[in-house]
Amino acid sequence: MQDILERISDPEGSLAVLDPATGKTIAHVRTYAKGEVAGIIRQADEARGEWAARTAKERANLLRAWFNLITERKEALAQLMTAECGKPIAEARGEIAYGAAFVEWFAEEGKRAYGETIPTFASGKRLLTIKQPVGTCAAITPWNFPMAMITRKVGPALAAGCAIVVKPAEATPLSALALEHLAREAGIPAALFRVVPTNDPADVGRLFCSDPLIRKLSFTGSTAVGKILMEQAAQNVIKLSLELGGNAPFIVFDDADVDQAVEGALASKYRNSGQTCVCANRFLVQAGIHDAFVERLTKRVAELKVAPGVEEDSKIGPLINASGLGKAESLVRSALDAGAVARTGGARSPVGDNFYQPTVLTGVTADMEIAAAEIFGPVAPVIRFETEEEAIRVANGTPYGLAAYFYSRDLARAWRVMEALEFGMVAVNDGILSTEVAPFGGIKQSGLGREGSRHGLDEYLELKYCLIGGIDR
Ligand code: ADP
């Protein structure tokens, strides 16, 4: 890790990167003011013509070289990620593999940006479509997946023939800078993919939306910031992809396999200490299975090891910072005040300042704040329900629509509920659904657009309709 860190950090830089497990400074990185970012956008825009003119295979070869370097440096990158965002090291290794997979996938998928021919409406005319890169793109990314949220944007952008400038989260610029460093080492022209850490995200966000050279902005983060960017993006009518907040229901029906449901619950809820936008946020459990599910879940959750992410057996690392901890803490307190019961956890952990105990709450009702807010902490609120209709009504009763999960062994119910849930992604009898081969994205206030799969490439391509006339002489 040390050799990469030396190359990407700058002791004189004004952005300090902290280890959330200890509060200690890991490194400083240089930041970019608005004027400098404008220059970088110009360079990116100048470089993209030559890049777009290369064949998809040539671009794929360079992306593949980048993928190989990421894979070779997996351990160092994972250590860097755990240091800056706190996630358990086993999960950091998982994210490097997952993030790299987007580069590999889009390297291949770039070769399949097919257009079409359209049966004509008039003899003497022929119709077709071609797909072309949208141009110079910008991306703003969050701290909870410091690497994969970048590759799922940069991979398709470069594969499609675009250039892209990325502003990483202030808490986690190191993984982003390491990716940029490896992309250069792989031979990807430097101007095509630039990372610009800043102390003033709002200012850079405004620049991304107002610079006439930017044709697309891809953002992953909170719904509040997504709305600001959507408004700002209106001025130049740029294309937008938004991956915003979620409030994922995790429904367990009476006919579920309770052991499978508990395994899925652990994977979905406690990954990254509950700090993912697809984390189960509310557990809806049917009356007949409620006590058995709660009992087994509580037992397993109480066994999760809370420890700094660098410890090999850590299962719950620190939350990202004091404000993340404060939010989880206050949501739990207000639920307890309103009558919920902590079956395990329910308080800070003595392991360190930013650590919270993995928690299971029962007696939660749909009107409590904890059932509406994105918790972003290792807390499972359990709501009891009686009927399928009630579960669907409660699950859909949110302005968010990112991921939903449910467990049932009844095939007819599985179809019914899968279709009735108003979410961009639904997992049946599973707790994890993210993969580079499937379209990730939300509906309602969870966002616009899809990342991963062939649909993720289309986000960086414009569809041009061409008509050729006068050919019947
Ligand atoms: P979180 O609460 O998870 O940090 P945010 O939406 O605040 O989520 O942050 C996600 C990304 O958005 C980060 O890179 C952050 O710097 C950036 N960001 C925050 N505020 C703004 C803004 N006003 N304009 C553009 N980007 C912003």
Image: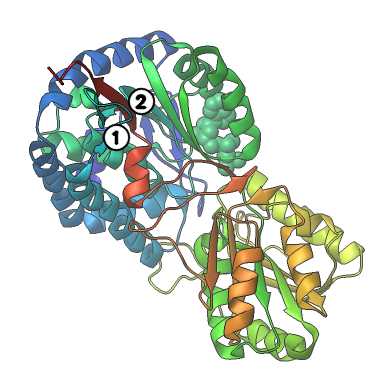
Disc on res. 126? none
- In terms of image quarters, where does ligand 1 lie? top right
Q: Residue 377 at what x, y percent from top left? A: 63, 59
The quarter of the image holding the C terminus is top left
Task: Judge left or right: residue 235 versus residue 348.
Answer: left
Mark 1 vs ligand 1: CB below 8 Å: no
Q: How is the image coloured?
A: rainbow
Q: Nearer the viewer, residue 122 or 297?
A: 122
Residue 175 in sight from this viewpoint: no
- Residue at left 15%, top 49%? 69
Q: Residue 186 appears in which quarter of the rendering?
A: top left
Labels 1 & 2 near each other (Cβ < 8 A): yes
Query: What amino acid type is highlighted by mark number 2?
Result: Cys
Outermost residue to the right: 338
Task: Judge left or right: residue 184 versus residue 308.
Answer: left
Q: Is residue 256 above or below residue 387?
A: below
Q: Which residue is mark 1?
A: 157
Disc on res. 137? 2
Secondary structure beneath label 2: strand
Query: What amino acid type is highlighted by mark number 1?
Result: Ala
Which of pointers 1 and 2 lies earlier in the amino acid sequence? 2
Q: Residue 430 at what x, y percent from top left? A: 50, 75
Q: Nearer the viewer, residue 290 or 4?
A: 290
